Image: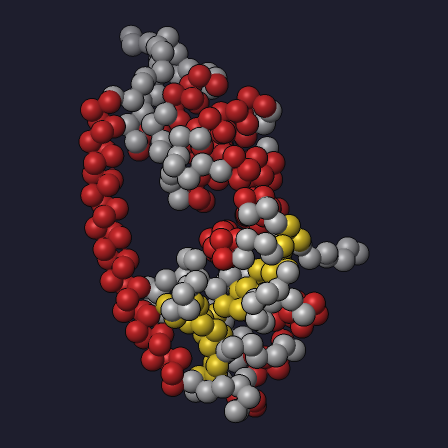
Amino acid sequence: MPRPLTLPSTTPELIRSALAHIPANIVRDEWARVGMAIKSEFPDQTGSDLFTEWSATADSFDANAVKVTWRNIKAVGGVAIGTLFHLAKENGFVMPKSDQAPSKPDPEAVAKREREKADSRQREQARIDADHARAAAESLALWEQASEPSEAPTLAPYLVRKGVQPYGVRVAPGGWLLVPLRDESGTLWNVQRIAPAKPADGAPEKLFTKGGRKSGCWHWCGDPAGAPVLLAAEGYATAASIHQATGYPVAVAFDAGNLAHVAKTLRQLYPAALLVLCGDDDLSTFALRGFNPGRSKAEACARAVRGLAVFPQFKTA
């Protein structure tokens, strides 16, 4: 009668071997999930070291981002160590038996996967570039056909509803507010369309041109020229409110993922300015997933650009 299969205990060595099969330059959400999986098993310094050592193998390694992300991950959450092993198996890892040593990646197999991934990335980038060019043309057409809110103030109900002023935005037919997304050269790549009222059917209130570029693009509320303090926030209404309250120029980054890209570019363009990142405190996400992307990304970004991260204060009952 065959002996039952016994799996090895989860040791740091086993996790380290599995991590060797997972490229650390995976998309950020998956990267964070790997950290969550490690912390579910080793919430102490051992786990932190494993996460840091693995993350350091990526070209885009950011030690501060690793520290902040690890600190903001709950030890007990929805992601367990099985998630890490699943990712490793997808990249060639074989779970050893209890009496076997963990396998090491086969150099030839790794090289082949890297070549295939490089070819795939090249094809994907060509597709993305084509989509960006098409979306930029569509966005420019929408922008040129829209009206200035000052010319038709009653056609911007979103601004009225939020109690904010128009700062470089336009209004499209039907009352949709258009917020432009531009790069450091001022080129318009995309527009965000904001509905005049929240759709009753649950449809999205905010839309971007399909396939358009967002990463590294922003919109200013206020003039940044010569300003000693520059702020950045995620949404237009938040940025406009902060600008009205402080008088400082505020960059609209549109979401937490783009905040880091925008902040790094602003640091290069305005090296002497104080950068203040106004992050969203995603408490509901933290309660569900054990990870607070808004706070984590804002804090890591602030460290990377030698700036400050601030968050809203919520009243408690």
Q: Tell whether 199 sits left or right of 189.
A: right
* Residue 306, placed above or below residue 18: below
Image-quadrant location for residue 64: top right
Assign the C terminus to one quadrant of the image.
Answer: bottom right
Q: Tell whether 308 sits left or right of 7.
A: right
* Residue 63, placed above or below residue 41: below
Q: Is residue 237 visible?
A: no
Assign the N terminus to one quadrant of the image.
Answer: top left
Residue at (37% x, 80% y) in the render: 142
Residue at (34% x, 80% y) in the render: 141
Q: Tell whether 249 sits left or right of 51.
A: right
Residue at (24% x, 41% y) in the render: 118
Residue 57, position in %: x, y?
Answer: 40, 30
* Residue 45, placed above or below residue 114: above
Residue at (38% x, 69% y) in the render: 187
Residue 291, position in %: x, y?
Answer: 56, 43
Residue 9, position in %: x, y?
Answer: 46, 16
Q: Is residue 138 visible?
A: yes
Q: Tell whether 170 sits left or right of 107.
A: right
